[in-house]
Image: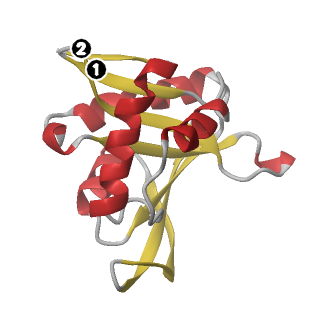
Amino acid sequence: MVVIRDAVLEDLPNILNIYNYAIVHLTATFDTEEETLEDRQNWFDNHNEKYPVIVAEMDGEVVGFSCLSPFKRKKAYSQSAEISIYTSPESQGKGIGKTLMEEIIERAKQNGLRTIIAVITSGNEASVRLHKKFGFKFAGRIKEVGYKFDQWLDVEYYQLLLK
């Protein structure tokens, strides 16, 4: 059974392991160097009730996390958020991302946000399918904006308008 809850400081080592796996093995993040626990602490400290971090826990272990972050720092963007969802390699394909997505969208609505934006690396079809399942619509592509694993990567923007 999967439990979704607010992340706490004690979750940071597991969150760090999940994120560092993505850094080393995936194009889902454009970070190229593994983070430290201090890096993740700073990241965590920049989230709050409006921009929460939640975790998926299974059998007492954190197997995924999701967060909302400010889309841009300028005041006019204050009702927009960027979404991130990461799951451990062992838990992929088990509905963890779907469960996290349901909860983080609900949190965004409760927090009065107007829109959620997903920035997805082109070719990440699993992420595109997940976001489309929840009503995210393609909003645009920026070509060759990131360089990782000896290749130029495009990013696609998907947007969910909350009503």
Residue 81 visible from this viewpoint: yes
Q: Quadrant of residue 48?
A: top right
Is 20 situated left or right of 107 in this image?
A: left
Q: Quadrant of residue 150?
A: bottom left
Q: Which quadrant of the rendered structure holds the C terminus?
A: top right
Residue, x 30% and y 28% (percent of image)? Answer: 99
x then y, percent, for residue 47: 63, 32
In front here: 37 or 124?
37
Q: Residue 57 — which label?
A: 1
Q: Which quadrant of the rendered structure holds the N terminus?
A: top left
Q: Which residue is labeled 2 in the image?
A: 60
x then y, percent, for residue 13: 39, 31
Q: CA distance from mark 2 to mark 1?
A: 6 Å
For label 2, count other residues whose C-alpha is less than 10 Å away and answer few (under 14), some (14-19) or many (20+). Answer: few
x then y, percent, for residue 41: 57, 34
Is 163 placed above or below 72 here? above
In front here: 60 or 124?
60
Mark 1 element type: strand
Mark 2 element type: loop
Q: Residue 27 — which label?
A: none
In front here: 18 or 1?
18
Residue, x 65% and y 24% (percent of image)? Answer: 111
Residue, x 56% and y 44% (percent of image)? Answer: 39
Marks 1 and 2: in contact by CB < 8 Å? Answer: yes
The disc labelled 1 sits on which kind of residue? Answer: Glu
Is 26 situated left or right of 115 in this image?
A: left
The disc labelled 2 sits on which kind of residue? Answer: Gly
